[in-house]
Image: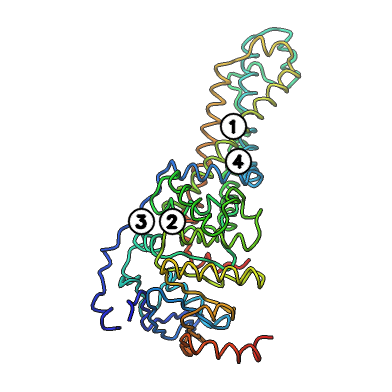
């Protein structure tokens, strides 16, 4: 019997290759996952939300102040000066401020990477199980990449809304009716666009490493994890 | 004599711990025939799980090789190995390993999606298979909303949905009470009888032994002995009195 089976030993390349799961299917699966662990996803998103809220707040406030300075109304100039705005400066950018924004974005990047690595560690067993069912590394990469990008985009949008609202409230409180009268729609939209791009880009970049790390997990390591 | 489906040839697994070599497996050779129900018995740390993982292509031997239906697992590419796991093997685990964020239906359907079907086809097949294991009504529940026995049924449906040739069950009754464990053993036994699936379980559970065609006893990384069906019954009697209280 043993002789018989060894003569019929087949060659490896007769075995077909496992099919790849299309992005659309992976997207549906990941979206359902994010929805069902919403609370956990919100915690992961918190970093992005805060960083982007801060960024969009700073940019929009800058836009509004610049528009008001440009309006050059004497009553308003008094209020602006008492608020500490240098109405004679050509450029309202502050290097310290830029540094602060940069730092907050960097913290956000580290935060997302950390949160995603945690998510991967928590779900090592899940990854191993999926591999036992026939998941390819590429599927794991796709699903974690989609998941963290989704969280990044949602978090960014949430951050934008918060940043914009806070900037509006603060501006209205400080300068009252002058704000709607001289609201710089174009430059504010531009700032929101920039913040959105920045948030999305950060989330996507931050998710690449954890996604690959997740896919590298051998199923046997995954199974060894005890409850 | 029926065809050999799994061949394990002089498989060794050696871990290097500092300057020392630790043998998890010391050269295991065993043939498993198509349609056979084999239990692998052994204390924890015996190498039972390691052997089990080798058969499932989850771990690679340091020496020797494992072949399934004549294909040497060590010669396969990762994508071919994934194909073998998906099409040939159904895995059942002690702690069920269901995806907590997926419903019963989705947990079974995902295996079918990996098989290459569209999500809609996958869900249809998953519903049928869940029906077959007696979970027709609870398919939209999350794993956390059903009992342990039902979770294991979902896991069995997931293992069966791709109509595998082999079921690998690692302590499938380990987290279940006596009665539920028996139900699960019967279910696995039925699948074996109805579909001619080869079943390999790693177990401590004496109840599983009586359902087995043969039992492989592993100790300290080597096969201690292999008992066939007739011999098992007698041994259970003696073990029951001594080691099992």
The answer to whether the residue labelled 3 contacts the one labelled 4, judged by CB atoms less than 8 Å apart, is no
Q: Quadrant of the C terminus of chain A?
A: bottom right
> Residue placed at 51% from the left, 58% from the top?
B132
Dot 3 or dot 4: first in sequence order is 3
Q: Nearer the viewer, mark 1 or mark 2?
A: 2
User: Is A37 situated above or below B233?
Assistant: above
Q: Nearer the viewer, mark 3 or mark 4?
A: 3
Q: Chain of mark 3?
A: A
Dot 3 or dot 2: first in sequence order is 3
Q: Nearer the viewer, mark 1 or mark 4?
A: 1
Q: Residues within 10 Å of mark 2 (few under 14, many from 20)?
A: many
Distance from disc 1 to disc 4, alpha carbons, whole Å, reads 20 Å
SS at circle 4: helix
Tell me the residue that label 2 is attached to.
Answer: A135
Residue B98, percent across and down? 56, 58
Q: Chain of mark 2?
A: A
Distance from disc 1 to disc 2, alpha carbons, whole Å, reads 32 Å
Dot 1 or dot 4: first in sequence order is 4
Residue A54, percent across and down? 64, 33
Tell me the residue that label 4 is attached to.
Answer: A103
Dot 4 or dot 2: first in sequence order is 4
Distance from disc 3 to disc 2, alpha carbons, whole Å, reads 8 Å
- Badges 3 and 2, same chain: yes
Distance from disc 4 to disc 2, alpha carbons, whole Å, reads 38 Å
Tell me the residue that label 1 is attached to.
Answer: A157
Report the side of A47 relative to B124 (left or right).
Answer: right
SS at circle 3: loop
Which of the 4 image quarters holds residue B65? bottom left
> Residue placed at 64% from the left, 32% from the top?
A53
Q: Chain of mark 1?
A: A
Q: Which mark is residue A18?
A: 3
């Amino acid at each position: 019997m043993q002789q018989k089976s060894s003569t019929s030993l087949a060659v490896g390349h007769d075995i077909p290759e496992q099919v790849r799961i299309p992005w659309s299917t992976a997207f549906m699966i990941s979206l359902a996952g994010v929805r069902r662990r919403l609370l956990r996803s919100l915690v992961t998103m918190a970093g992005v939300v805060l960083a982007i809220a801060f960024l969009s707040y700073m940019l929009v406030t800058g836009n509004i102040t610049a528009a008001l300075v440009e309006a050059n109304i004497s009553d308003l100039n008094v209020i602006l000066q008492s608020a500490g705005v240098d109405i004679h400066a050509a450029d309202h950018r502050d290097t310290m401020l830029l540094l602060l924004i940069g730092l907050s974005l960097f913290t956000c990047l580290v935060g997302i990477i950390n949160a995603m690595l945690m998510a991967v560690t928590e779900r090592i067993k899940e990854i191993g199980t999926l591999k036992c069912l026939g998941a390819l590394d590429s599927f794991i990469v796709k699903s974690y990449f989609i998941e963290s990008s989704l969280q990044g985009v949602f978090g960014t949008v949430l951050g934008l809304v918060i940043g914009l609202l806070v900037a509006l409230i603060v501006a209205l409180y400080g300068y009252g009716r002058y704000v709607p009268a001289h609201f710089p729609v174009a430059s504010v939209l531009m700032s929101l666009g920039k913040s959105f791009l920045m948030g999305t880009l950060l989330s996507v970049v931050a998710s690449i490493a954890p996604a690959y790390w997740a896919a590298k997990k051998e199923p046997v390591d995954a199974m060894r994890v005890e409850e | 004599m029926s065809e050999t489906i799994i061949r394990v040839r002089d498989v060794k697994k050696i871990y290097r711990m500092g300057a020392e070599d630790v043998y998890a497996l010391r050269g295991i050779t065993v043939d498993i025939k198509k349609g056979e129900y084999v239990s692998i018995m052994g204390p924890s740390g015996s190498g039972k799980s390691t052997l089990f993982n080798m058969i499932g292509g989850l771990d690679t031997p340091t020496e020797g090789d494992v072949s399934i239906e004549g294909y040497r697992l060590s010669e396969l590419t990762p994508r071919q190995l994934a194909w073998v796991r998906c099409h040939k093997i159904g895995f059942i685990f002690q702690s069920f390993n269901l995806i907590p964020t997926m419903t019963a239906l989705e947990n079974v359907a995902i295996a079918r999606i990996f098989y290459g079907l569209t999500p809609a086809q996958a869900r249809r097949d998953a519903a049928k298979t869940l029906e077959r294991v007696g979970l027709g009504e609870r398919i939209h529940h999350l794993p956390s909303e059903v009992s342990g026995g039902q979770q294991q049924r979902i896991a069995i449906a997931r293992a069966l949905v791709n109509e595998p040739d082999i079921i690998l069950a690692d302590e499938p009754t380990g987290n279940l009470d006596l009665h539920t464990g028996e139900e699960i053993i019967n279910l696995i036994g039925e699948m074996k009888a109805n579909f001619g699936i080869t079943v390999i379980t790693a177990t401590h559970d004496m109840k599983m032994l009586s359902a087995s065609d043969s039992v492989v006893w592993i100790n300290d990384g080597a096969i201690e002995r292999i008992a066939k069906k007739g011999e098992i019954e007698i041994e259970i009697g003696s073990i029951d009195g001594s080691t099992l209280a």
